[in-house]
Image: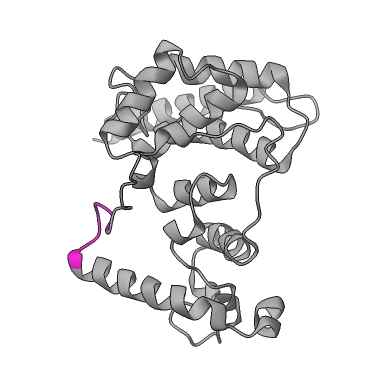
Amino acid sequence: MDQALTIDRAELNASIARATDALLRQQRPDGHWVFELEADATIPSEYILLAHYLGEAPDLELERKIGVYLRRNQADHGGWPLYHDGAFDISATVKAYFALKVIGDSPGAPHMARAREAILARGGADRTNVFTRIQLALFGETAWSNTPTVPAELILLPRWFPVHLSKMSYWARTVIVPLLVLQAMKPCARNPRGVHVPELFLPHGSPAPKRAPHQSRGWATFFGALDWLLKRADPLWPKALRERA
């Protein structure tokens, strides 16, 4: 038993030493490391859309590389998944299609037609998740009324309130606070190339999903009623209170 434990510990120490040496060999002269941040198609797509939302001068070589990456990772179902060999995800597919069109891919190209047909077959861009619909609203592709209302005044709630920002994880705060500002300001993307994607919406629209796949009917009903109430209360908030928030 002791001998086996000693051997295991020796193997463990050797493995740690090899891993340490491998990491040190890849360390840059100034002390930092650079590794690929692996993610699904939404991250590079969102980078493209962010640059054009801000109106920044495009990095054409980087756009070309992202275009190659997105085309290479399009799945057999015509869209993009959230993980390798995963199922079709309509939100990831809408973002990837939009990004490729911004880069310069023709809507008539075979890969774009496949993606568009797959999106429309599943109800169109109105069926995307909340974050994607907000991004589409920023570009004027859909109305802000198609996104959940998140009043900026939420930030002014007292600490004892059940949904105070201090009770949320750091990553939730980094998402929610910008959304509060966007919902209040409702800015419009600069979009210097003037690219739009009306072809991703069904002619008569398709209502946004009432509940997420993981959501129970009860919670979906509750949040639906809350959103209905907030949409009607939104114009009534005192202007000074909103500016303070």
- Seen at 60% across and 19% down, the residue is 104
Q: Quadrant of residue 181?
A: bottom right
The x, y position of residue 35, in whole percent, is 60, 27
The x, y position of residue 213, in whole percent, is 24, 51
Which of these two is toward me, 51 or 118? Answer: 118
Magenta residues?
211-217
Which of these two is toward me, 174 or 52? Answer: 52
Which of these two is toward me, 227 or 19? Answer: 227
Query: For the C terminus, which image quadrant?
Result: bottom right
- Seen at 76% across and 35% down, the residue is 56
The x, y position of residue 49, in whole percent, is 60, 36
Residue at the left extreme of this rendering:
217
Q: Quadrant of residue 227?
A: bottom left
Q: Is residue 206 left or right of residue 30?
A: left
Height in image: 212 above or below 94? below
Residue at the top extreme of this rendering:
110
Is residue 52 in sight in this rendering?
yes
Is residue 39 in sight in this rendering?
no
Residue at the right extreme of this rendering:
30
- 195 magenta-colored: no
The x, y position of residue 30, in whole percent, is 80, 30
- Seen at 46% across and 61% down, the residue is 145
- Seen at 31% across and 52% down, the residue is 207
Magenta stretch: helix, strand or loop mostly: loop
Query: For the N terminus, which image quadrant?
Result: top left
